Image: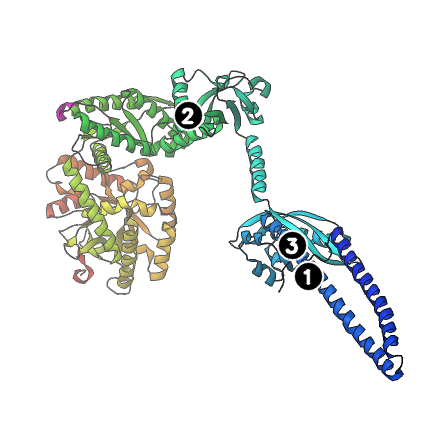
Amino acid sequence: MNYSPKFDRNLSKNSFADNNADVLKVVLLYAAFSGLYILVSDELLHWFLSSDPELLTYASIAKGYVFILVTSALLFGLIRRLLRQNLADIKVREEAYRILTEQSPAIIYQATVNNDHQAIFISSQVNELGYSVQEWIDQPGLWRELIHPDDVQRVLAEVEAAIKNNTALSIEYRLKNKQGEWRYFHDKARIVNDSEGNPLYQQGMLLDITARKLTEIELKIAAIAFESTDGVFITDASKIILRVNSAFTKITGYSAAEAIGKTHALINSDRQDKHFYASMWDSIDHAGAWEGEVWAQRKGGEIYPARLIVSSVKNADGAVTHYVASLTDITASKAASDEIKNLAFFDPLTKLPNRRLLMDRLKQALASSIRSGNKGAVLFLDLDHFKTLNDTLGHDIGDLLLQQVAERLTHCVRVGDTVARIGGDEFVVLLEDLSPEAIEAAAQAEIVSNKILHAVSQQYQLGQHSYRSAASIGAVLFSNHDIGIEELLKQADIAMYQAKDSGRNSLRFFDPKMQEAINIRAALENELRLAIEHNQFELHYQTQVDNNNQLIGTEALVRWVHPERGLIPPFDFIPLAEETGLILPIGHWVLETACAQLKLWQQGQQTKEISLSVNVSAKQLQQMDFVAQVEQMIISHGIDPAFLKLELTESTLLEDVEGIIAKMVALRKLGVRFELDDFGTGYSSLQYLKKLPLNQLKIDQSFVFDITTDSNNRTLIRTIIAMAHSLDLKVIAEGVETHEQLEFLKHNGCDHYQGYLFSKPAPVKDLKLF
C-alpha cells in the first residue's frame, strides 16, 4: 500500500508547461512523418509498380500496415519518455515532501472526510504519541478515540463545519498518548476538493503545544497566587520593594505606591530587634529561604502577629536577583491556637493547669530531682463537704468556691511551684526544690500544707452567701529514685483519704501500709464481682423473740461463701460493696431470696406468722424504681407484705430525707413495715424521726454489750425505750448474749430481743424455729 501523499492536484505551472510542449512535439512530429510518409510512399509505389496494378494494390495495403507499426513504435517511445520524466519529477517532489515532513516539528497528515477520519498519510512524528505510522493508518477512528472527552464534541463540530463550508480549520485540543498522558495540540488543516468542488480529503498538521499550554496554566496560577489572600511582595537584590499584591495592601494598610521603592523594614515592628532580622537574612542567604512568625506593624501603628516566608531568586550564575516574600496575618489563628492551648492544658473554670499539664510538669520535676538531688512533694487536696454545698446552694455557687480556692492556693505557693485542678473539688500542688533530706523536705511540705489549710478555711463570700470550707490534704515526697508519676498521684490520693478518715481539715503523709490495704481492697473488689457473677452468697437467719421468749421473726443476714476462704461475714465486704455500688446487685439478690423464703414460711401452719427483717442500704433506697422493685417481688412471690420488715440504718437518712420518706410511705401503703437499725449510733434526728413511717427501733448491740457495767449506756437504753414508746414504736435490742442483759432490758420495757442468747445466725436448713 502506498502511503505517499497525493500530488495530482499540486503540480506546478512549470510542470504543466513542460508536459504541453512534449505533447506538441509528438503531434508535430507525427504530422510531419505522416505527411512525408504518404507523399513519398505513394510516389515510390507508383514509380516502381505502376505496371502491375495488382501488386500495387497489395503494396498499398502493406504500406498502411507499415505506417501503423512505425507510428505506434514512435508513439510508444515518446509516451514512455514522457512517463519516465513525470515519474522522476514525482520522485523528486516526494523526496522533497518527505524531507519537509521529517524536519517539521508538527505531525503532517492527510485524512478522509468521512465519520472515521481515517489517516491516508501521516508523518513519522506521530511516533511522539507512542504510535507507529502503520498503527495510525490501520486503525480507523483512532484519532477520534484519543481526543479528550471534554474536547471531543467541540473538535468534531468544528471539523464538520470546515468540511461543510470548505473553510480552513484551526483548533486546539488534547490527545492521549500511548502512555495515557494528555498532550495539547494545535490542529491546522484545510479541505482538498475535486474539480467539481466535492471534498476529497483533509490535509493538515498537528503541532504539540503542551509546553506552551502548561506555561500558560502556570502563569495563570502564578497570577492567581500572586493575588491570593496572603500578602505578597517582591524585592530586588537590594531588598527594595518592586511589586505588591492587593492582599499586602489589605493586611498592611500600605498602597502599592506607598510600598514600592521602600525596603521590607516598612512593615517591621520594634518587638524584634535588629539581631533577629540579621539572623533571618543570614538564614535566607545561606539556605535560600526563611519561614517563621514575626510581629509586624500596620500603617496605622497596630502591631499584629504574622507568618512570613521569604525565598531568594537566583540567576544561572547563582547570584540573587530578587526576593519573594509571603505575609499572612495570623491574629485570629494565633488567638484560636492560644485558646486551644488553654483548653488543652488549663482548667476553664479556675484557669489553673489541668491534669495533662500537671503530668508534664511532674515529669519535668522528677527529671530535675534526678539532676539536683533535691526532693519534691505532691500535695493532693480535696474540699470537705463540697457535694453538700453543690446540692444545697447549687453548682453556680460551687463554681464560685472553686475559683476562690484556686486563687488562695496560688497565693500559698512559690512562683516555681504548680497548683493544678484535676477534677471536681480535687487540687494538686507540686512543690519542687525542697531539701535533699527527707525530714527537712517533709517539714517544708508541712509548712506549705498548713498555710493552705489555714487559707482554705477562711470565710468565703459566694454571691449573697457567706461560707466556710475546709480541706483534707494527702502528701507524698519524691526524689531521684522514686516511683512513677501515676503511682505518685495514687499515693497522695490515698494519703488524702487517710486525712479525711482522721477527721478532715488535716494533713497526712502517705503510709506504705495504707497502700497494702488498698491493694488488698482492690483484690477483694475483683473477687466480690466474681462472687456476684457466680452466685457465691447465701442467707443466714437469726431468730427474734418477745418477752415470753416466743419466736416472732427472724433477720436475714447475707454471707459470702468464698470458694477458698470459706464463709466471709458481712462486715468484711458490705462496706466495700457500698463504696463500689456492688451493694445494688447484692441487695437485690438478698431481698429476692428473702421474699422467696418468706413465701415458704407463710405456706406452713407453724411458720406463717414469722416476720422477716431485711437490711436495705442507702444506695438501694436512692434508686428511682426501688418501690416498684419491692412491689414486683411481693407480687411475684405472692407474700403477705405485713410480715416483711425493711431495716434502715441511720446513715441512710443523711441524704435526701424527704425522698426516702416518700418511698417509705409508698411501701407502707403496700403493707411493708420498717425498722430503724443501729439506733443511737448515727443521725438520730428527732425532727425526722417523728416523720418516718417506722414500726420499730433497734437498739445497737454496742449499747447492750456493757449494759451491766456502764451506767451511761443504761441511761441511754432507758431513754431510747421511753422515746420509742412515746412515738408508739416497738423496741428490739440486738446483741443480747446474757441473762443479765435480758433482765435489764425486760425490766425497762424492751419489747423484742435478738442475739446469741437465743440463736446464732444459721442457714435455713440449720435454723431451729421451734
| Residue corresponding to mark 2 | 284
Residue at the disc numbered 3: 92
- Location of residue 19 in the rendering, given as x and y in whole percent from the top left corner: 76, 57
Residues 361 and 283: in front is 283
Give above or below for 327 relative to 48.
above
| Residue 307 appears in view | yes
The x, y position of residue 536, in whole percent, is: 22, 57
Q: Report the span colored magenta.
A: 431-440
Q: Amino acid at mark 1?
A: Arg
Task: Point out which mark residue 18 bears.
Answer: none
For mark 1, give the secondary structure: helix
- The amino acid sitting under disc 3 is Val
Label 1 sits on residue: 84
Find out whether residue 439 is within the magenta segment.
yes
The quarter of the image holding the C terminus is bottom left
Which amino acid type is marked by label 2?
Ile
Q: Nearer the viewer, residue 31 or 520?
A: 31
Q: Residues within 10 Å of mark 3 (few under 14, many from 20)?
A: few
Let me know if residue 703 appears in the view.
Answer: no
